Amino acid sequence: MKRLIVVDVSVRLIYPAVIVGSVYLLFAGHNQPGGGFVAGLVTGAAIALRYAVGGIEEIRAAWRLRPWTFLGVGLLLSATTAAVPLAVGGAVLEGASAEADLPLLGHVKLTSALVFDLGVYLLVIGMVLMVFEAFGDDPVVPER
């Protein structure tokens, strides 16, 4: 497969910036538009760029964990965040928050919505990786 050096270098420069942007969307989604789903889609776009440049092996090298690991952890986080309020007498997805003063970060507020969005984020990434895993391999052509 012939590769263009300009495209390779461009994707290698853009990829980390898109991933950082998706993490920003994940955290900013509670006060502004965004959140786990949109952040996952942006990460999916970065994965698609990486696939276009290097194929499935490039994706496997960049994301060492298998897609079903992302799916399982994301589903576990989202389902647990939704169900825990039921166990303590609340409603499904009832919000909770905790605040702390951390040495390097200062005053930090953690909400259950963030944990739920993190689960959704991992689910979307897992689905995108699963699509490339399922359809990304080149077909094996038997030699004659």
Image (spheres, helix red, strand yellow):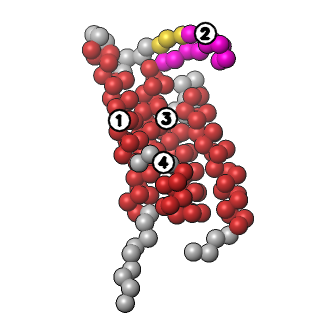
Q: Mark 2 highlights which residue?
A: 101
Amino acid type indicated by mark 1: Leu
**Which portion, as a residue range, is magenta?**
100-111
Q: CA distance from mark 2 to mark 3?
A: 25 Å
Q: Position of residue 85 (x, y in %)?
A: 32, 16
Task: Name the kind of residue labelled 2 in the image.
Answer: Asp
Q: CA distance from mark 1 to mark 2?
A: 30 Å
Checking the image for residue 75, the label placed there is 1
Q: Earlier in the sequence, mark 1 or mark 4?
A: 4
- Dots 4 and 3: beta carbons under 8 Å? no
**Upstream in sequence: badge 2 or badge 3:** 3
Mark 3 vs mark 1: in front: 1
> Is residue 108 located in the magenta-colored stretch of the structure?
yes
Whole-percent x, y for residue 105 in the image: 65, 18
Please name the residue that numbered disc 4 is placed on: 64
- Residue at image coords 44%, 58%: 132
Q: Residues within 10 Å of mark 3 (few under 14, many from 20)?
A: many
Cβ atoms at labels 3 and 1 below 8 Å apart: no
- For label 1, the crowd category at 10 Å Cα-Cα, with few meaning under 14, some 14 to 19 and many 20 or more, is some
Q: Quadrant location of the C terminus? A: bottom left
x, y percent for residue 64: 48, 48
